[in-house]
Amino acid sequence: MDPGRFAGLPIEQWAGSLGPNGLPYALPIHPNLVHFTIGLFVVAIVFDLAGALYPLEKRLFRFLQLPVTRAGLHDVGWFNLLACAAVSFFTVASGFYELLLAQPISGVVSSIGLGSAATMVWHGVGGVGILLVIVAMAIWRGVQRFSWRRELGRQVQWSYLVVGLLMFVVVGVHGTLGAELAAEFGVHITADQLLAAGLDLREALP
Amino acid sequence: MLELLPALNDHNLPWMDTLHPIVVHFVIAMAVVAVLFDLVGSLGRRPGLFEVGFWNLLVATLAIFVAIIVGQVEAGLAEPYGASREILNLHSTLGWSLAGVLAVLTGWRYVIRSRDPARLPLAFLGAGGLLVLLVAVQVSLGNQLIWIYGLHTVPVVEAIRAGLV
């Protein structure tokens, strides 16, 4: 890509090996790992909630002829959160790598009224914060499973579920910021970057 | 009749952002992780993990139908151009096919689990490997629609509306 765009920036040293999307490869990694972080977190909390409310819903499962155990539902809650915590280190690491190479289109204000710098900083710092919460919740969940509530049918405290549901809101806002970096600021999107460079997509991206 | 439909925003959508990439979290992650838990359960002789695999597979199957409904609406509003037309066709065809594959696998798995939840035949693991492969192809097609062609992104929608694409 045009090395002149990066004049004076550290990124200039790499300009020759970056594609039109600003990355040394065609498809960004972070948004694909995000599928795992969010999918695993949400399903983990939902299944622990289902395990906690098991006495209410067991007749529904019987009606559906779907054999289910309370311990099985909590197993999904535990192992999915464990997998979520493991994969999220890579989600955040790849996110920071791709954030360092981000070239947001200048002059854009997002639909929630933030500029690119604010959106990038909130999404970057927020990502580290969410990773910390996920790891802390995994430890909390493990202590409940193996110590505090080992003898009990309901394997999680209500407070754990409340924190999990609050995190749905935080992750939703955080994900919106990330989506805006792509769909509004054009970060790492080939077509958007070509358009911003003044090229005709009919020729540049047939 | 057409004026009864909601107005489209600068993403060419009747809602704030694309919903399909959000719904597919629950297809991609759950399908891949289901196979992973089955694999670890088999290799590590931990049949307890088969239960985690089963439930994740069930969630993936429920989610893919939502993903398809939302995906068809957003595909209809995507205004693909150039080579992205063909990619979107492939993505749609494979998406519907994956719904069939996931439904059949979940039905098969339900029968296996009903007979003996602590055993998983090798054939099912093989089918799981095939499922992960299909999901990977489908994800890479969807990735190209967003990250290369920028469908539903503001700059591309702007250029399409200006007749520049």
Image: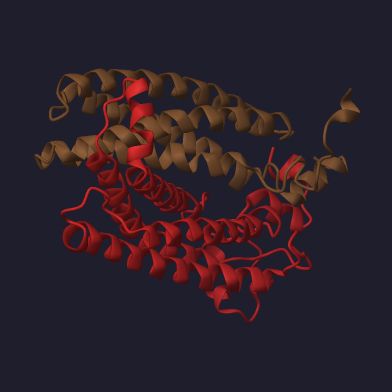
Chain colours: A red, B brown
In this view of the protein, can residue A9 be seen by the observer? yes
Establish if B113 lies above or below A37.
above
- Camera-side residue of B95 and A197: B95
Asked if residue B47 lies left or right of residue A77, the reply is left
- Camera-side residue of A117 and A7: A117
In percent of width and height, residue B149 lies at 65, 43
Asked if residue B17 lies left or right of residue B114, the reply is right
Quarter the C terminus of chain A occupies: top right
> In the image as oriented, which residue stretches furthest toward the bottom?
A8
- Camera-side residue of A64 and B58: A64
Q: Residue at x 73, y 43 (%)?
A: B15
In percent of width and height, residue B118 lies at 13, 30
Establish if B62 lies above or below A38.
above
In this view of the protein, can residue B83 be seen by the observer? no
In percent of width and height, residue A122 lies at 59, 71
Quarter the N terminus of chain A occupies: bottom right
Establish if B126 lies above or below B22.
above
Q: Residue at x 48, y 33 (%)?
A: B63
Q: Residue at x 33, y 18 (%)?
A: B107
Q: Residue at x 84, y 39 (%)?
A: B7
Asked if residue A153 lies left or right of residue B2, the reply is left
- Camera-side residue of A89 and B61: B61
In percent of width and height, residue A114 lies at 72, 68
Residue B82: which quarter of the image?
top right
Count of numbered circles on the image: 0
